[in-house]
Structures are given as structure tokens and as C-alpha cells.
Image (cartoon, grey):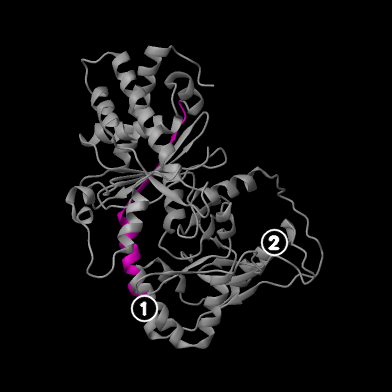
Amino acid sequence: MYQYTRLFGYTRIPQHGCDKLAYSPHPNSIKYILITVKNQFYILDGYDQNGIRLTAGDIEKQLNDIIADVEKAQLDPPVGILTSDDRDSWTMSRERLLAVSPQNRETLTFIENALFAVSLDDYATGTDLDKFLGNIFHGLDGHNRWFDKEISIIVDSNGRAGMHGEHSPCDALIPAFASEWILKEPTSLNAQISGRPIPPPSRIRFITNEQSLKDIRATEGRTKELIADSDATILQFSEYGTSLIKKIGKCSPDAYIQMALQLAYYQLHGRVVPTYETGTTRKFLRGRTETVRTLSVESKAFVEGMMDKSLSAQQKYDRLQAATKAHTNYSIDASNGKGCDRHLLGLRLLLQKGESHPIFEEPIFAKSQEWLLSTSSLTSGDYFNGTGFGCVYPNGYGINYLPGARILKFGIESKFSSSETDSKAIKESLIKVLRDMRNICEQVNGKHSKL
């Protein structure tokens, strides 16, 4: 449960060489959140002067007051765009910004200490989920964000919302669990205002000079290129979900989905590649993750077998069973602290200057960690439209998924600049292999209804 103490009030601070985390020790004494509207920053207190939490109606009024203030305010330059830059460039821009005025140190402290951020966008992405995913990733142009906050809730002008996360303080499952718990709670569109005296929201501002504006313009250019290169899409596969997988596949639903990803990639690209899946080690004190290496001798035999027309349905099903069993066993070992990647990472980080070891110079070892398929699952996602994260190699895919009982949701990201990848193509490949795998399983185990 330790990671839940790292959910609120955390901000990643750019530093030379290695970033650091700014936070207040748990339990956090901070009681306000950061609101961004049209690139302007506001502090909204969540409690009144007597320490009583605001009602939903009170918070709604505060948000409307902020919007009204922005409409008549003189707008400051979009300083938040600087957080979208590469870390070294943002480090330098931040240092120059701090040198302009002591007020900027105060403003940064307010931002960094806030429990979380809420970005109210003055536009909507409509019903296109791919555009909505892109807006949660980076906005239309990287504006109206503070990307270093661990949690940022992004709200379209039509009320649709999503969450953007800075991953270093805790794993994605933690805010996902918290979000599901929140979304299960009933709410009212006509929430009552308490009538208690409430401190008004306060605007916090940066003082900028010509160098600050130059840094902003340069960052805007680099961010525009990054956004244009992101090929992101959502797949909502509603033909079946984990309930049917258990009935016809008779295996772990996660292992089944991982084999579907292996087969989708193989069908599209004609080869297998190193594949990362997140395994949790939260049963250990302050445990985070271990790598589950999906690619195995058994998974390779499965994808090759599925493309072999000479094999019977039973033979293909047997290979699926062997592959999912191997994957499940590896996942259990990884969660029990018996994985290899975090251990080897620790040893590598302990090397002193001038030290080395043959394994870290071995080309095959390095190649085995080129995660051209970087994958992870979250909750069942019953309350979410989708999910997603970026690829970790420019010629790879980042695929996050929500394994629901009746629907499987995938977020897929790759780069337009890579001639090797195509997010829309692998989405279509994934649809096909999910149907093919169902067909094989039903030929062996009989048909079942979707429910």
C-alpha cells in the first residue's frame, strides 16, 4: 500500500544528470490543487478557513470563478509548455526562469506542492477517441499543462475528462485503482453550494523576460514536432472479453492477450521481438515492478504455428496452452522477486567508474532489452474509454490495455517517423488475431456465448 502515499503532492523536478521528486511527507499537509486555464495558473483551496472540505457545489463555483477571471485577465506567456521539453533543456530554462524574479520561485513552489493539477481546456475533441487520447497525452499543442505533476486531470470543454500521469513516483495501477473508486461514487449535476465563507481561488503568475519568451518559442517548436510524430489510437474490441477467454481458452486472460499481441506483431512484421510486460512486486516493501519477458520459446512456437496451415486446430490450441502456461509461470516468478531484469539493473548501477562486466557488454543481452513491444495492463477499465502510453523505442510500439469481462480496450502508440511501425495497421492485425484465436479455441472447446 506504500505507493498510495505517493499519489498526491508529487512533482518531478528537472535536474542536471538526474531529476528529483518534490513532495511533502505523508500525511500531506497541502490542501490545494492547481488549476490551469488558457495557460494561466490558479490555486484552488479544497478546505475552508475552519478546515472543512468544500462540497462539490463549492468546488464547481470556484472553477466557474476561475474561468470568469481568465476571460477578463491579461494573459501571461505559456510557461507551462516548458515542462514538455526534454529534461536537460527544461532544466536550463527553469534555471533561467528562476533568475528573472524571486516571484518565480514562489510560483514554482505553489505548483510543485499542489496535490494534483486540473487542466480545463477551452476546446473539445468531439467523439473521436483517438483525438481524445492525443489530447490527454499532450494537448493540441502542449499548452495548458504542467507535465511534471504526478496527476493531471484533463477536462475537455464538453466535460469529457482523462488523467495524465508522471510515472516516476508510483505505478500506473495506483491512480487507476483510485480513479475507478472515485468514478463508482455517485455525483450530482446540481450539487449544492454550502454557503460557508470560502477563500477565493488565487492566481499565481510568472515574471518573464525576453530570454523566457525565447525558451518558450523554442520549446513550442520541438513539442510541435513530437506531437506530429505520435501515432496513437484506441481499440475497443467488444466481441468478447476475459469471461469468454476463461471459458474457451482455459488459461489466464492476461497470458491470452499477451499471445494475441505477439501474434498481431508477427502477422504484421513477420518476426518476433523482445517484449516487455509490467509485473508488479508490490507484495514486497516499497516494491514497484519487474519485467515479464513475454517472448519465449513457447510464444514463438505459438505464433509460427498459427500461421502454419498444415497444423490442426488442436495442434494450434496446444501451442497456445504451452505459451500461456509459460507466460503465467514467468509472471508468477517475476512477482515473487525471481525475475532477472531488476536484479541486473541493480548490479549495473552499482558499477563504479571504470568497472564493467562481460554480460553488460554482450550484444545479445543488450538486444534482449530493446523492447520493441512495450506492454502493460491496468484494471478491467469498466469506467474508462481507453488507456495508453508512448513507445519506448522509436521503431516500436507502446500498448496498454484494459481487460474487461466483456470488452478489451487497447491504447497503441508508435511514431509516424518510423518506417517499421503503423499503429492503425497493428490495431487491425490485433482485431484479426483475436478473432482467429477465438475460432481455434472454439473448435477445440466448443462455442460459448459472449457473456
- What is the quadrant of residue 441 in the picture? top left
Any part of residue 78 in sight? no
Region of the chain picked out in magenta, as a range: 217-239
Any part of residue 442 in sight? yes
Quick check: 7 above or below 41?
above
Residue 74, percent from left and from top? 54, 78
Which mark is drawn over residue 168? none
What residue sits 37% from the left and 28% below the top? 324
Q: Is residue 225 magenta?
A: yes
Where does label 1 land, which residue? 92
Residue 306, percent from left and from top? 27, 23
Quick check: 423 above or below 299?
below
Residue 308, percent from left and from top? 21, 20
Left or right of 243 on screen, residue 394: left
Q: Regarding mark 1 in the picture, which secondary structure is present there?
A: helix
Where does label 2 land, which residue? 59
